[in-house]
């Protein structure tokens, strides 16, 4: 059976950690423009490189002469990252890991990665955004468990008002909580180990810092 996990290399920040390398092990890779530089850090060879290449210098392009490239005009309707994820889905992706999706020089791009990830989750895809130092997972209604080390920081950010929110296995647990839109009530919690979340209604993003124990 073909591998259905694809890692999309985006242009934001990346710290290579053991946790990140474990997450992308055996994945297939597609690079979006300057995200190709992360291929060197990860020691991988993407099967496709897409974008308008306005942020990839000649030296980077010369280092990957054998990777298939698809070049788009700058006057396109989608970001390079959205084009890359569409290519992955066309190739059978069901799980998407967006590397370099957090941080970086462009706040508009980082915010768009959050929104795009939420739309992918609503279409049934399993999505993880990561910089290595920080991870984000779209959370729709239902149950989710995050395997976090004891003492790691995490937050739940409501993209809407949330109803019936449970947080179990954390320093500050919640039960059947109604979180108003815009509230900071669920920012900076601390994992006691794997954390389980339940949500009856709403849309949220769970952000975790697996290597940050400053709240412990």
Image (cartoon, rainbow, N blue to C red):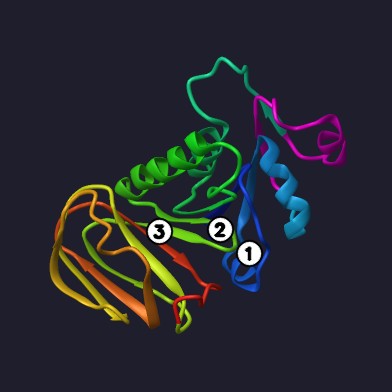
Could you tell me residue 52's position as x and y percent? 65, 24
- Mark 1 touching mark 2, by CB under 8 A? yes
SS for tag 1? loop
Work out whether 133 lies above or below 71.
below
Q: Is residue 65 visible?
A: no
Closer to us: 118 or 26: 118
- Please tell me whether residue 156 is drawn above or below residue 6 in the rendered image: below
Q: Nearer the viewer, residue 89 or 131?
A: 131
Q: Is residue 159 above or below residue 144?
A: above
Q: Is label 3 in a helix, a strand or a loop?
A: strand
What is the x, y in percent for residue 133?
Answer: 58, 63
Taking the spot 41% from the left edge, 45% from the top edge, the residue there is 114
**The disc label shown at residue 147, or none:** none
The residue under label 2 is 3
Q: Between disc 1 and disc 2, whose residue precedes?
A: 2
Q: CA distance from mark 3 to mark 1?
A: 20 Å
Residue occupying the point 36% across, 64% down: 155
In this picture, residue 215 sits left or right of residue 139: right
Residues packed near mark 1 inside 10 Å, few (<14), some (14 to 19) or many (20 plus): few
Judging by the rendered image, the residue that carries numbered circle 3 is 137
What segment is highlighted magenta in the picture?
Answer: 45-68
- To which residue does mark 1 refer? 26
Q: Is residue 52 magenta?
A: yes
Asked if the residues shown at circle 3 and circle 2 are in contact, with their CB atoms under 8 angstroms apart, the answer is: no
Residue at 87% over, 35% down: 59
């Amino acid at each position: 059976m073909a591998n259905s996990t694809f890692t999309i290399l985006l242009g934001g920040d990346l710290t290579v950690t053991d946790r990140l390398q474990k997450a992308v092990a055996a994945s297939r890779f597609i690079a979006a423009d300057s995200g190709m530089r992360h291929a060197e850090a990860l020691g991988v060879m993407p099967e496709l490189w897409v974008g308008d290449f306005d942020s990839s210098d000649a030296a980077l392009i010369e280092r990957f002469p054998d990777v298939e490239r698809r070049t788009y005009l700058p006057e396109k309707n989608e970001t390079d990252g959205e084009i890359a994820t569409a290519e992955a889905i066309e190739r059978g992706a069901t799980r998407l890991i967006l590397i370099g999706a957090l941080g970086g020089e462009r706040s508009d791009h980082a915010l768009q990665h959050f929104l795009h990830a939420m739309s992918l989750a609503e279409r049934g895809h399993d999505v993880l955004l990561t910089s290595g130092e920080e991870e984000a997972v779209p959370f729709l209604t239902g149950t989710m468990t995050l395997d976090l080390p004891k003492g790691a920081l995490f937050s739940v950010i409501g993209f809407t008002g949330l109803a019936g929110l449970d947080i179990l296995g954390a320093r500050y647990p919640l039960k059947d909580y109604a979180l108003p839109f815009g509230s900071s009530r669920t920012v900076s919690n601390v994992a006691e180990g794997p954390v389980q979340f339940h949500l009856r209604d709403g849309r949220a993003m769970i952000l975790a810092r697996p290597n940050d124990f400053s709240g412990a």
